[in-house]
Image (spheres, rainbow, N blue to C red):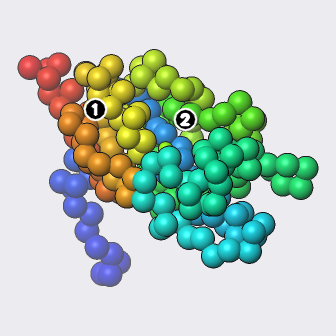
Amino acid sequence: MTNVKPVSTEAAAEQAWQHGVVARNGLRLGIDLDGVVADFNAGWTAIHNAEFGGELTADLVTMWDGLHRIGGFADMDAFWEWARGNEHRPSIFRHLDLLPGAPDTLRRLDDDGHRIVIVSTKPDWAVHETMHWLADNEIPTREVHLTFEKSEVDCDVYLDDAPHVLHELVQHRPDSVVCRFVRPWNEPVPGAVDVHDWTAFHAIVTAETSRRVTETSD
Ligand SMILES: [Mg+2]
């Protein structure tokens, strides 16, 4: 037993306190999918390369709504027409990889006692494939909203990467914490918190929980 490291009772107590408090005060976390949980740009460029023989890479995407130029389509309507799939393959949404840190952090947040609320914008033709994708990847959620009006879904904390969505959430959800997942295609949004990775998002959620607990106990 001489090699067994003593457990820090202070850390254990802190962990137990935090878990108990969070479990009783779990937050509703509004989580976007594409560009946040799912690697949308790696997914569509890989399919594009397979079909057209090019060498597109995800890092070419540096602006919102510029995908058609990268893909060689006339406009975004043409891009989405291609994206929806055909008799030979499903849509580009069906088999996207997970972004680093996303699944582990979502599971941890769920274990902590928070509610994972998926809030994603998808065309009608991608709804069932999105449900398949969520199941395939065992995303820990009981609540899925596929909507063009994200601010109608009431959450305590939001995580999104779309510039127009971030502005909408800040405007319509002033009491919530709106997190901008920092990506090359978005810019700082007044009122939104910059989040660079999933570890930072976990820390923000935990801090917000503590803040609310302290506020209500004052
Ligand atoms: Mg997104």
Q: Residue furthest front?
A: 74
- Who's the residue at 70% across and 64% down the image? 48
Q: Quadrant of residue 20?
A: top left
- The amino acid beneath tag 2 is Ser
- Who's the residue at 65% across and 41% down the image? 77
Pinpoint residue 129: horizontal percent, then vertical percent: 74, 41
Quadrant of the frame with the N terminus: bottom left
Pinpoint residue 64: horizontal percent, then vertical percent: 45, 48
Determine the secondary structure under disc 2. strand
Q: Which mark is residue 159?
A: none
Q: Is mark 1 within 8 Å of ligand 1?
A: no
Quadrant of the frame with the C terminus: top left
Determine the secondary structure under disc 1. strand
Sequence-first disc among 1 and 2: 2
Q: Which residue is mark 1?
A: 177
Question: Looking at the image, is 29 positioned above or below residue 7?
Answer: above
- Who's the residue at 22% across and 55% down the image? 11
Q: Which residue is mark 2?
A: 120
Q: Is residue 190 left or right of residue 157?
A: left
Q: How many marks?
A: 2
Q: Quadrant of residue 196?
A: bottom left
- The amino acid beneath tag 1 is Val
